[in-house]
Image (cartoon, grey):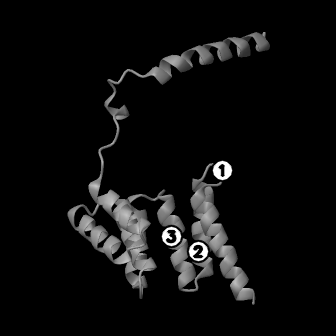
Amino acid sequence: MKRMLIHVIAIAAFNAVPAWAAGGGDDPNLRPERRDAALEAIQGAVAKSDWAQARALARTAIEKDSARAEYHNLYAYAIRKGANPEMELVFKHYNEALRLDPKHRGAHEYLGEAYLMVGNLGKAKEQLKTLDGLCFFTCEEYTMLKKAVADYEARQAK
């Protein structure tokens, strides 16, 4: 009887997949997101390692819409990667990104890397632990921060 029930459920689930996958197009939640020209411009500057341009674009984006976690994350990233990073500003904006979106994996990874830059291994490991909880399996952000922590620890052991 139990085996028969499992078989019926499996068939029902299998037959439901094509109907679900086809979609109707009427659900407003399924509409593609609008392009974010500011975000694309910032990401383009980051891709070119043009930290000054990325910083300026992100700062302008934050001035227009301070409620976007990704703007704060990329602003802090551009500051951190640029020459003579103002670490107080870096921490302020990573923390603001996480206040706006506590599950922002990129901000957790980058905040952990920022902590390593100032020699705070314990805080970096806290971010790694948070990422471990956010990622269903390992994710790129967890893997990258884990490698950064391991590299930091190896340098300290020398």
Labels 2 and 1 touching (C-beta < 8 A): no
Instruction: Report how far apart the C-alphas of labels 2 and 1 lie in the structure.
Output: 20 Å
Mark 3 crowdedness (10 Å alpha carbons): few <14, some 14-19, many ≥20 = many
| Residue drawn at point x = 39 percent, y = 78 percent | 79
Q: Can you see residue 67?
A: yes
Residue nearest the viewer, comparing 47 with 156: 47
Residue 153 on image: x %, y %: 70, 81
Quadrant where the image shows the N terminus: top right
Question: Which element is circle 2 on?
Answer: helix
Residue 106 on image: x %, y %: 49, 62
The residue tagged 2 is 124
Q: Quadrant of residue 151?
A: bottom right
The residue tagged 1 is 137
Mark 2 crowdedness (10 Å alpha carbons): few <14, some 14-19, many ≥20 = many
Vertical comparison of 100 with 14: above or below: below
Question: Which element is circle 3 on?
Answer: helix
Vertical comparison of 25 with 51: above or below: above
Vertical comparison of 69 with 94: above or below: above
Three-letter amino acid code at the position of disc 2: Ala
Q: Earlier in the sequence, mark 2 or mark 1?
A: 2
Three-letter amino acid code at the position of disc 3: Tyr
Instruction: Report how far apart the C-alphas of labels 3 and 1 lie in the structure.
Output: 19 Å
| Residue drawn at point x = 67 percent, y = 17 percent | 10
Three-letter amino acid code at the position of disc 1: Phe
| Residue drawn at point x = 49 percent, y = 21 percent | 20
Q: Quadrant of residue 144?
A: bottom right
The residue tagged 3 is 110
Q: Can you see residue 129?
A: no
